[in-house]
Image: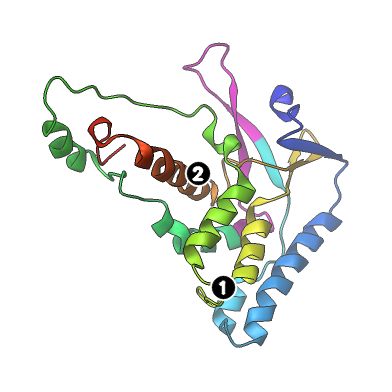
Amino acid sequence: MNNVLSDSSKVLEVGDLQYSLIFKAEDKINRTVKLPKDNGLLSAQSYQSLYSSGSSFSVLYGLPKVHKTNVPLRPILAAYNSPTNHLAKILVPLLCHLTNNQFTLQTSAKFIPEILEHDSNSIMVTLDVVSLFTKVSLHETIEIILGKLYPTENDIFNGFDSNSFRKLLELSVIDINFVFNTKLFKQVDGMAMGSPLGLTFANIFMCHLEEIYLGQCPEALTSPFL
């Protein structure tokens, strides 16, 4: 796990526990959601559901990848009581429609008729991203999300303008503090497994790449699924 934490491009050591960081994180979230409430764009019920209080630091632990050489660890954050956990959970259903595209199939039942349309001379290739979550570019993914939700400057989405929603996304996934072995760390890039938005951000990021690169492939080389 110390090897995982040694990548300074992803994780920085903050030092001893600083509980004031929890209060600061809660205050940032509460001030961000209070503005649209005061402007009449967010209901009192929605504001209460987004309000953050009584939080604690996320805790890092590792799950062994027993199927891989040297049994590396998969880093997982126990983030169920972090300042951003409730906010992240509420954002997931708002973003789920961005996690699919024309190349996505949801079930094997839909995969079977697709594959049967190809003759025996076709070649099927599967691709895998090593450590996908930690390689998701947070700032780039936020820009992708905002570009899709706010096609024009004055659009309102679910009671938030573009700037307010950007702040919510940034608060949910950027500079996340966590504890390992009594030391405090900050994740500066990449998604953490354990965050409610982890899978959502990873899927949105991959959908964006699929649309770019598969859209440029000759039609004979691609199928409408991955």
In the image, what residue occupies the spot 65% across and 71% down? 51
How packed is label 2: few (under 14 Cα within 10 Å), some, or many (20 or more)?
many
Q: Secondary structure at mark 2?
A: helix
Tell me if 5 is positioned left or right of 132 in this view: right
In the drawing, what numbered circle is on residue 202?
2
Tell me if 194 is positioned left or right of 120 in this view: right
Q: Which residues are magenta?
A: 61-86
Q: Above or below — where is 203 with respect to 55?
A: above
Viewport quadrant of the N terminus: top right
Q: Is residue 63 magenta?
A: yes
The percent position of residue 163, horizontal first and vertical second, equals 65, 69
* Observer-nearest of 206 and 57: 206
* Quarter occupied by residue 30: bottom right
In the image, what residue occupies the spot 25% across and 41% down? 224
Q: Secondary structure at mark 1?
A: loop
Task: Tell me which amino acid carries mark 2.
Answer: Ala
Tell me if 225 is positioned left or right of 8 in this view: left
The percent position of residue 3, horizontal first and vertical second, equals 72, 22
Q: Name the residue beneath numbered marker 1.
A: 153
* Quarter occupied by residue 116: top left
Q: Is residue 190 magenta?
A: no
In the image, what residue occupies the spot 64% across and 51% down? 173
The percent position of residue 176, horizontal first and vertical second, equals 71, 48
How packed is label 1: few (under 14 Cα within 10 Å), some, or many (20 or more)?
few
Tell me if 200 is positioned left or right of 80 in this view: left
Residue 7 in sight from this viewpoint = yes
Residue 183 in sight from this viewpoint = no
In the image, what residue occupies the spot 56% across and 16% down? 71
The percent position of residue 98, horizontal first and vertical second, equals 42, 56
